[in-house]
Amino acid sequence: MIQELQVRHVEHVTTRSFEEVVAAFEHAVGSIEAVGWPALPGGARDEGAFRSRVEEHLGPSGFTRFLTLDHGDWLKLYGQDAKVVMYTLGNPLIAITMLRHDIRAGLNVPVRLLIYRDEASGTTRLAYDVPSTLMGNIENDPCLDAARGLDAKLAALAEQATGARA
């Protein structure tokens, strides 16, 4: 089966420096990168223990980083001087609000987000694909309602980090 989806792509454009946006973003989200994902469910005895483990790693935004990939680090090996970092972020306690209704939502949570410096315009951009639109093949209202809640939380985080609306 092959399906086509219409995905909404969002970019928050700001005159803040790349470093300022990255710092604001990283301050707003927690991280499980040091312990790794398996440590969270791995030692949990029950839902309450898992919830506690997750909450320890959430930032003020309610998100945590699962992966940080600095493309700029390796692009310089190819002669490209770029400021660009991709993050995988989410919150399993938000993910369950979708996954309990339709397991296919797991393809799009956690979400990916890119912060990069656009040298042509002299701006910094924070970009992501709107989660609920990535789930356009799911016809489950409770799942999509939860995904739209994730959309709003992601937009608020992006506005906070950039100081700009999309």
Image (cartoon, rainbow, N blue to C red):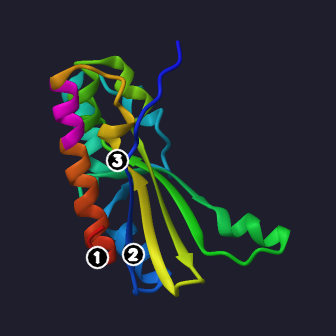
Res. 11 visible in picture: yes
Q: Amino acid at mark 1?
A: Ala
Is 62 located above or below residue 40 in the figure?
A: below
Q: Are discs 2 and 1 less than 8 Å apart at CB? A: yes
User: Could you give the CA–CA distance between mark 3 and mark 2, rounded to whole angstroms?
Assistant: 16 Å
Is 119 located above or below residue 37 in the figure?
A: below
Q: In front here: 148 or 77?
A: 148
Task: Tell me the quarter of the picture where residue 5 sits.
Answer: top left
Side of 144 relative to 68 (left or right): left
Side of 75 relative to 48 (left or right): right
Q: Residue at x 22, y 24 (%)?
A: 47
- For the view shown, which residue lies furthest in the top direction? 1
Q: Which numbered circle lies on residue 130?
A: 3
User: Could you give the CA–CA distance between mark 2 and mark 1, rounded to whole angstroms?
Assistant: 6 Å
Q: Amino acid at mark 2?
A: Val
Q: Which numbered circle lies on residue 164?
A: 1
Task: State the image coordinates of residue 122 (x, y, percent, origin top left).
Answer: 52, 87
Q: Disc 2 designates what residue?
A: 13
Label 2 element class: strand
Magenta residues span: 142-148
Task: Tell me the quarter of the picture where residue 44 sits.
Answer: top left
Q: Earlier in the sequence, mark 3 or mark 2?
A: 2
Label 3 element class: loop
